[in-house]
Image (spheres, rainbow, N blue to C red):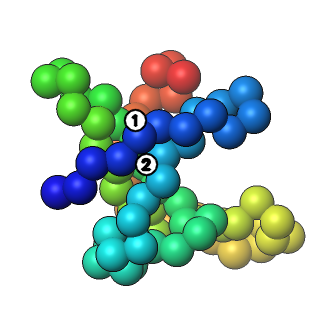
């Protein structure tokens, strides 16, 4: 476990993840993740695999079996 601080990024707030955590999770810059607030108040961040990048032409299929674990009405 490591501790870090939230930082202002323009009008948003960002979370920096240590390189060791990114490598262990198989993530890199611009990786897709899902974020879920649990009933306990904990925040769960999970990698999302097989999604179509926003800059692609949209012809690749999105893996329907991947779960983002959040409901659109939460946003």
| Mark found first going from the N terminus, 1 or 2 | 2
Count of marks, rendered view: 2
Q: Are marks 1 and 2 in contact (CB under 8 Å)?
A: yes
> Residue at coordinates 62% horizontally, 34% vertically from top-left?
8
**Is 43 displayed left or right of 34 in the figure?**
left
Q: Residues within 10 Å of mark 1 (few under 14, many from 20)?
A: few
> Residue at coordinates 82% horizontally, 66% vertically from top-left?
55
SS of the residue under disc 1? loop
* Residue 18 seen anywhere in this rendered image of the structure: yes
Quick one: 44 or 58, which is closer to the camera?
A: 44
Q: Nearer the viewer, mark 1 or mark 2?
A: 2
**Eyeballing the image, is 27 above or below 42?**
below
Q: Residues within 10 Å of mark 2 (few under 14, many from 20)?
A: few
Residue 37 appears at what percent x and percent y?
Answer: 31, 29
Quick one: 62 or 70, which is closer to the camera?
A: 70
> Residue at coordinates 54% horizontally, 22% vertically from top-left?
75
Name the residue that disc number 1 marks: 70
**Is 30 displayed left or right of 58 in the figure?**
left
Quadrant occupied by the N terminus: bottom left
Residue 39 appears at what percent x and percent y?
Answer: 18, 22
Q: How far is the residue under mark 1 from the one under mark 2?
A: 8 Å
SS of the residue under disc 2? strand
Q: Quadrant of residue 19?
A: bottom left
Residue 5 appears at what percent x and percent y?
Answer: 41, 40
* Residue 50 seen anywhere in this rendered image of the structure: no
Name the residue that disc number 2 marks: 34
Q: Quadrant of residue 21?
A: bottom left
């Amino acid at each position: 476990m490591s501790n870090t601080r939230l930082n202002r990024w323009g009008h948003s707030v960002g979370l920096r993840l240590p390189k060791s955590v990114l490598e262990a999770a198989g993530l890199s810059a611009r990786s897709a993740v899902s974020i879920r607030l649990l009933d306990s108040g904990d925040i769960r961040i999970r990698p999302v695999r097989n999604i179509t990048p926003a800059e692609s032409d949209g012809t690749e299929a999105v893996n329907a079996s991947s779960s983002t674990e959040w409901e659109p009405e939460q946003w």
